[in-house]
Image: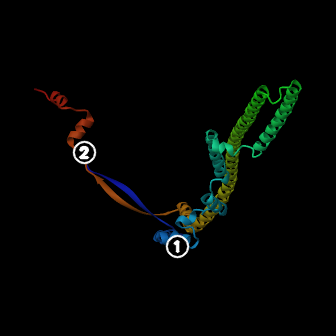
Amino acid sequence: MATTTSVSSALTDVPDILKPYITGAGGVLPTAQTIMGQSYDQMYGNALKQAGLAGSGRVASLSPMQTQIGNTLSGMQVPGQFGAGTSAVQSGIGTLQGLTDPSKTQAFMSPYIQNVMDVNKAEAMRDAQKQLVGANLASARQGTYGGARNALMQSEADRNLQTKLGNIQATGMQNAFDAAQKAQLAQAQGYGQLGSTMGALGTSQLAGQMDITKAQGAYGDLQRAVQQQQLDAQYKDLMDKLNQPLYNVETMSNLARGVPLTKVGETGAQTTPPPSFASQLAGMGLTGLSLYNMFPGR
């Protein structure tokens, strides 16, 4: 036998008094549709462009100090001390090479060396003359003055004098040459020390310049960081302002979720067909074998 069951279905709707706030002009849904129907430029782009915060406008440019550092680095040159030091070293090398060149060594010899040697020679000649006079007096006392023996003695004295004068000249020139080479070596060493000193000064100057540049760079980075923070703050404030309508719609939507809804119900009848004979048997616990056993004369 078929069974008839009553089923209630209900439709819900917003109360009439609240409908203007949901679907009316200025309500949640129309406002959301209006906002979401705008293009990116309408919602954000145009306002960002007018504020100078679109694209690269949001990135802080180089700070004045960073620009100054860039100009300083582009115009920076090798310290002049390096060039002066190199020239000094080259001069020292040239002086060392001149140690084996007598013509260059002569430039270091005293210009008065010959005067000194001439004085020594004159002194030697006076000593020789004194000795010769004494010898002649002795020969005169002995009665041999003007003889062969006296002539031989004078010849020997002259030869000794010339030898002594030659030794004075040679020794003086050798001493002068040795002193000149020492002066050359001292000058070469002086050039080397000067080159080393100038190189150290150049290195110190360059290090000092770089230290100053690093300090200025750090300050320039700080300037730019502050400028970037200002741009970020301006961008956030503007985006908050542009998104305010969305925030308002979201708030209105949240409020609308708590609005009590009215029910508009309707009832309908549903007819269920009776169960089949087989299902009834199964429900009664009867099987084909049990039915067979129920009938006599099997």
Residue in the foreground of this view, choosing between 69 and 175: 175
Query: What quarter of the picture does the C terminus occupy?
Result: top left
- For mark 2, give the secondary structure: loop
Residue under numbered circle 2: 275
* Residue picked out by circle 1: 46
Residue 251: percent from the left, percent from the top? Answer: 57, 63
Q: Where does the image place residue 49, in percent across and percent down from the top left?
A: 54, 71
Q: Which residue reaches farthest bottom?
A: 25
Closer to the N terminus: mark 2 or mark 1?
1
Farthest residue in the left direction? Answer: 297
Between residue 54 and residue 190, name the one nearer to us.
190
Nearest to the observer: residue 230 or residue 177: 177
Measured from the top left, where is residue 32 in percent x and y? 49, 68
Q: Quadrant of residue 166?
A: top right
Amino acid type at circle 2 is Pro
Q: Is residue 283 visible?
A: yes
Q: Is residue 19 visible?
A: no
Residue at the location (84% across, 36% down)?
126
Mark 2 burial class by Cα count in 10 Å: few <14, some 14-19, many 20+: few
- Residue, far top: 142
Residue at the image position 23 percent from the left and 40 percent from the top? 279
Say left or right for 47 vs 173: left
Vertical comparison of 212 with 125: above or below:
below
**Taking 278 as reference, is 12 above or below it?**
below
Tag 1: residue type? Asn
Determine which of the numbered discs, if any, sits on residue 241 in the image: none
Q: Nearer the viewer, mark 2 or mark 1?
A: 1
Q: Secondary structure at mark 1?
A: helix
